[in-house]
């Protein structure tokens, strides 16, 4: 084990994800000292009949066994014990759980949790604690009927997004609750004493009592109202299966249903540093934690990712993995049915915007493969692709849309579209050389992010053309004159949203290693401060450990320290190297007009 001697406090950050449980250990200087993990398929495949951590059922149902997570927790702690891990030095624990997943506790849960016998494994102690032994997983697609119900009641996708931060999604917890209550197992719903998210399940186990749902992660339920910061009664009625219009019940049945679901969900745990309580005796006796070990609220995995860095307002983190995920910190409560808005997990006034695209790396790989075939290059090489990209300096009035898979944003089936801007008009082009596709795919993917991030950036407050910063006035006026009003996802872009710029952009994930792609993207985004290519191994677990450490610090000092300021007390973040980027932001104004026009012409099923 690699721990220095002494009695400095240690912090644990857990990450309970689809395929594994990971624990990272940090010290009070935010140094990651060690990680431990268990892969579910490696350890529990036969016991729980899982494949890639889940069980696929009928009609798109995807579930995870809850007992497996308890086994996983014991397994990792046993591993740590064998490694002579100093459990007694742990001062605080926090972490993350995959978003949207829920746990349905039964009537025996509270007593089982409070009476856990440290000589027996967790799963045995909590054998009778669940009304449902499986948890709906975020990959589930079985709630089509519920999706329609939620949007019907909330005034369509935009109405629901305006209230809760997201339109209805199969995986969102409110829909999963309604499915259980109305369709799949009403008896189980009735027998459910409490409902946790994955992120509130783990701290409940640590505390030995059921804790409430953490506020930022609550935004992934389609039940939480961003403006009141509470669950919304009407949406609760839908989830409980007691909505007068949908379910034909009386007002009093509705009220009883809402009250009952509120009780099952418990109080929301607001964004903050206060401990939920101390670790339960079970863990002290079984593993040697000290009784004063604090348990802090856990949050969702994407939310934990953004707190693994001191991201400030207008900073963007782009994950260029198989898919592309854009995470953005903002104070603007600007919702859209095309992305998600969550409360920020450590900054009470802020939000996290999340845009998920299906067509990221795989779409670029298709272009690369075709290019390499044409030029007889090695199949997996990015050399030729990068060479072309590096040579393209500014926008050449050609743009493509590359959706080999159906896309989430904008919502559209698989298709391709190529267009050129000529004589003041956007004209469809049947085909062009694959070399054109290289620049075009990176440009259009970036412009899509830029247009959707725009309204969330703070300078987007400017709604009148007259208020646009003088240096941007001419390009904005030209854009407006050529393309007229520009709409993205049904909403008109304002002068401010079109001319806003991010502060920093951080690139992570597989394709972020490709500096040609990253440089091109950066030149289009026009970040005012810097662009960075970074690697954050175990980001969700690390974010959890940092949250524990920050919370502990605030509690010790008895004051709320700004989260990012706290992270910066430790200089690790100041060594990031800026990418040398040529800013071509202004050149890409016509590309925004073009993309908006092209998206309006996409085929729909
Ligand atoms: P995941 O999203 O599954 O966690 P990664 O973050 O590892 O995966 O990203 C995988 C993707 O990264 C692959 O689809 C691949 O196309 C892309 N990738 C990896 N290296 C490069 C590179 N040098 N240039 C462009 N794309 C790359
Ligand atoms: C986010 C989502 C996934 C899960 C699992 O909305 O469904 O990212 O959080 O990682």
Image (cartoon, rainbow, N blue to C red):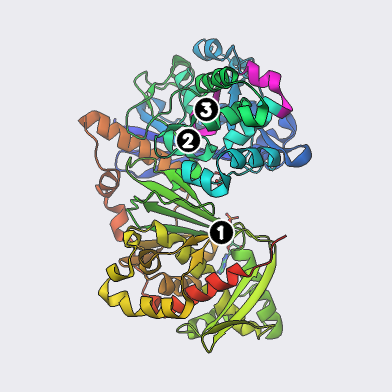
Q: Which mark is residue 570?
A: none
Q: Which mark is residue 321?
A: 1
* 15 in the magenta segment: no
For marks 1 and 2, give the one nearer the viewer. Answer: 2
SS type, badge 2: strand
**Mark 1 sits near ligand 1, with its Cβ under 8 Å away:** yes
SS type, badge 3: helix
For marks 2 and 3, give the one nearer the viewer. Answer: 2
What's the magenta bit mostly, secondary-structure-wise?
A: helix
Q: Which residues are magenta?
A: 183-201
Q: Is residue 144 above or below residue 334?
A: above
Can residue 8 be seen here? The reply is no
Q: Image point 46% across, 74% down: which residue?
A: 484
Q: Position of residue 96 (x, y in %)?
A: 48, 38
Q: Label 1, label 2: how many angstroms apart (C-alpha)? A: 29 Å
Q: Quadrant of the C terminus?
A: bottom right
Image region (quadrant) for ligand 1: bottom right
In the figure, is residue 12 to the left or right of 420?
left
Which of 59/116 is in front?
59
Q: Is residue 456 above or below residue 514?
A: above
Residue position marked by numbered label 2 in the rendering: 224
SS type, badge 1: loop
Can residue 164 be seen here? The reply is yes
Q: Earlier in the sequence, mark 1 or mark 2?
A: 2
Q: Label 2, label 3: how many angstroms apart (C-alpha)? A: 18 Å
Quadrant for residue 507, please give it: bottom left
Q: Earlier in the sequence, mark 2 or mark 3?
A: 3
Q: Position of residue 557 (x, y in %)?
A: 21, 31
Q: Residue furthest bottom?
A: 423
Residue position marked by numbered label 3 in the rendering: 201
């Amino acid at each position: 084990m690699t721990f220095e001697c002494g009695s400095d406090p240690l912090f644990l950050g857990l990450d309970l994800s689809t395929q594994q449980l990971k624990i990272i250990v940090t010290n009070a200087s935010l140094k990651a000292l060690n990680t431990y993990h268990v892969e579910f398929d490696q350890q529990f495949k036969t016991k729980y009949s899982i494949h890639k951590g889940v069980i696929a059922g009928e009609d798109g149902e995807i579930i995870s066994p809850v007992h497996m997570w308890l086994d996983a927790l014991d397994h990792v702690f046993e591993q740590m014990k064998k490694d002579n891990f100093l459990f007694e030095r742990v001062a605080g624990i926090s972490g993350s759980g995959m978003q949207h997943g829920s746990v349905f506790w039964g009537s025996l849960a509270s007593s089982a949790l409070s009476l856990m016998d440290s000589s027996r494994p967790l799963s045995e102690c909590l054998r009778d604690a669940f009304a449902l032994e499986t948890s709906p997983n975020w990959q589930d697609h079985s709630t089509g009927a519920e999706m329609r119900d939620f949007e019907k009641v909330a005034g369509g996708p935009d109405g629901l997004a305006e209230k809760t931060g997201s339109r209805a999604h199969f995986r969102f917890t409110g829909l999963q609750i309604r499915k259980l209550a109305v369709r799949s197992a009403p008896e189980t719903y009735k027998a459910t004493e409490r409902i946790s998210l994955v992120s509130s399940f783990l701290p409940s186990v640590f505390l030995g009592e059921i804790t409430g749902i953490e506020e930022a992660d609550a935004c992934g339920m389609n039940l939480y109202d961003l403006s009141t910061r509470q669950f919304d009664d009407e949406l609760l009625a839908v989830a409980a299966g007691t909505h007068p219009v949908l379910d034909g019940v009386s007002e009093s049945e509705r009220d009883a249903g809402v009250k009952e679901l509120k009780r099952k969900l418990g109080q929301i745990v607001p964004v903050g540093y206060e401990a939920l309580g101390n670790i339960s005796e079970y863990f002290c006796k079984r593993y040697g934690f000290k009784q004063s070990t604090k348990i802090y609220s856990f949050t969702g995995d994407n939310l934990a990712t953004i707190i693994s860095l001191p991201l400030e307002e207008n900073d963007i983190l782009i994950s260029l993995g198989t898919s592309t995920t854009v995470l953005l910190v903002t104070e603007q409560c600007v919702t859209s049915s095309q992305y998600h808005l969550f409360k920020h997990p450590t900054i009470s006034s802020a939000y996290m915007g999340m845009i998920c695209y299906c067509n990221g790396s795989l779409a670029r790989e298709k272009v690369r493969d075709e290019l390499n075939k044409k030029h007889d290059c090695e199949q997996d090489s990015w050399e030729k692709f990068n060479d072309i990209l590096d040579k393209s300096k500014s926008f050449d009035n050609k743009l493509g849309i590359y959706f080999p898979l159906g896309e989430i944003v904008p919502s559209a089936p698989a298709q391709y579209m190529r267009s050129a801007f000529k004589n003041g008009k956007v004209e469809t082009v049947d085909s062009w050389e694959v070399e054109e596709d290289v620049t075009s795919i990176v440009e259009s993917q970036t412009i899509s992010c830029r247009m959707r991030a725009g309204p969330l950036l703070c300078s987007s407050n400017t709604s009148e053309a007259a208020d646009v910063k003088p240096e941007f006035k001419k390009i904005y006026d030209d854009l407006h004159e050529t393309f007229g009003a520009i709409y993205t996802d049904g909403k008109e872009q304002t002068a401010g949203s079109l001319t806003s710029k991010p502060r920093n952009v951080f690139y992570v994930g597989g394709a972020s290693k490709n500096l040609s792609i990253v440089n091109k993207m950066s030149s289009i985004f026009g970040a005012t401060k810097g662009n960075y290519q970074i690697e954050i191994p175990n980001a969700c677990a690390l974010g959890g450990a940092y949250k524990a450490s920050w919370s502990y610090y605030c509690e010790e000092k008895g004051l709320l320290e700004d989260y990012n300021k706290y992270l910066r007390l430790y200089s690790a973040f100041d060594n990031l190297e800026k990418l040398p980027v040529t800013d071509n932001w202004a050149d890409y104004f016509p590309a925004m007009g073009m993309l908006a026009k092209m998206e309006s012409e996409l085929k729909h099923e």
